[in-house]
Amino acid sequence: MDLYLQDKVVLVTGGGAGIGAAISHVLAEEGAIPVLVTNAAPEAALLADLQRLQPRTEVILTELCDEAACRRAVSQTLATFGRIDGLVNNAGVNDGVGLEAGREAFVGSLEKNLVHYYLMAHLCQAALRESRGAIVNIASKTALSGQGGTSGYTAAKGAVLALTREWAVSLRHDGVRVNAVVPAEVITPQYQRWLNTFAEPQRQMEKNHRAHSARAAHDHAARNRRYRGVSAVVAVIAYHRAVAVGGRRLPASRSGADVSGAAAGRRRFCQALDLIDSPALIAEYQQRHQRIWPGIAAHLREHGILDMEIYRLGTRLFMIVEVSADFDAARFDAASLNNPEVQRWEALMWHYQAATPWTPQGEKWVEMARIFSLQQQ
């Protein structure tokens, strides 16, 4: 991928191990400068590899539950690089704090898994506004499904999703994109330690995620592929020209998706865009859509877009998109960015299109909020 991240400065909390290390690695591959904000020094081999890819890689040892330490990490980053282009809130631990643990343990779990997400975003917001950067929050599928015996962690990850939407709204006029990634089971060292607390770790893992075989779950290559998959999603939505709209949680669902109104096994969402106010250009735009390039139609169908309709009123365009139940927005965005024909088509369309008054800078189609559903009355 070439995501135009060259020399972008991206803080990654917990960037020295597990998913965070993989995110740092992908960012370095893309030419970004990963700043690992971590409470433990990364393994020598990882650090050497990161510095080979990006010699300006920085490690800042930080206790994220300490506000002063977080302030020092952000200040040090700004002093060293003069800017912050991205924040990946990743650090956390599924600590098994359940209903029996009590208030003190529950609040402690929120400190380890939620509060520093807010604090780092708070401390980075001015720099991100200046760079028109991005925040990516790592959540967890436990926020959507539950797990049992882990009230603190699931509460924190649910709140992460809520904050993602809140910050996307709060920062949208400043051009700062905010999204969340929702991984399922990824066999990190911390996850393995949690599994080992059960009498039968293997049975517990299979109970949590039956879709993965026992062999694949412990296979080093399979684990790295899952790390890589999560990391690629993070890199794509940190990309400063990404079409992803702020406030999404990926890949668990597409924000604004209307499941009830679509056919079974489908999801639907609606977007808006404007046209340049020129009768000649509008006529030409409509003519080009009578028969779009075959490669563009094939690309859409190949990646799970089942139907797409565009309506016009004056200069306002309204698009309805239906996607398959397993549609992966991040994968689609990445494939589009790496497809030369798609990029030529998008460049051509921009000769006719114009941002709406509510479109964040650098974006095109924006999702519309559904305000009424007859089925829900």
Image (spheres, grey):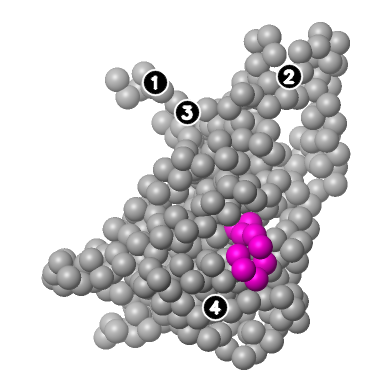
Residue matched to label 1: 372
From the top left corner, tell me how far across and down residue 153 is, in percent.
Answer: 31, 65
Of circles 3 and 1, the one toward us is 3
Q: What type is the residue that disc 1 sits on?
A: Phe
- Going by the numbered disc 4, the residue's amino acid type is Ile
Among the two numbered marks 4 and 1 on one chain, the one whose residue lies closer to the N terminus:
4
Residue placed under numbered mark 3 in the picture = 369
The boundaries of the magenta stretch are 78-86
Q: Specify which label sits upstream in the sequence, 2 or 3.
A: 2
Query: How many angstroms separate mark 4 from mark 3 (CA)?
Result: 40 Å
- Reading the image, the residue beneath label 4 is 60
Instruction: Specify which label sits upstream in the sequence, 2 or 4.
Output: 4
Is 2 one of the magenta-colored residues?
A: no
**Residue lying at 75% horizontally and 81% vertically, measured from the top left:** 52
Q: Which residue is mark 2?
A: 275
Q: Under tag 3, what secondary structure?
A: loop
Circle 1 packing at 10 Å, graded few (<14), some (14-19), many (20+), is few
Distance from the alpha carbon under mark 3 to that under mark 1 = 9 Å
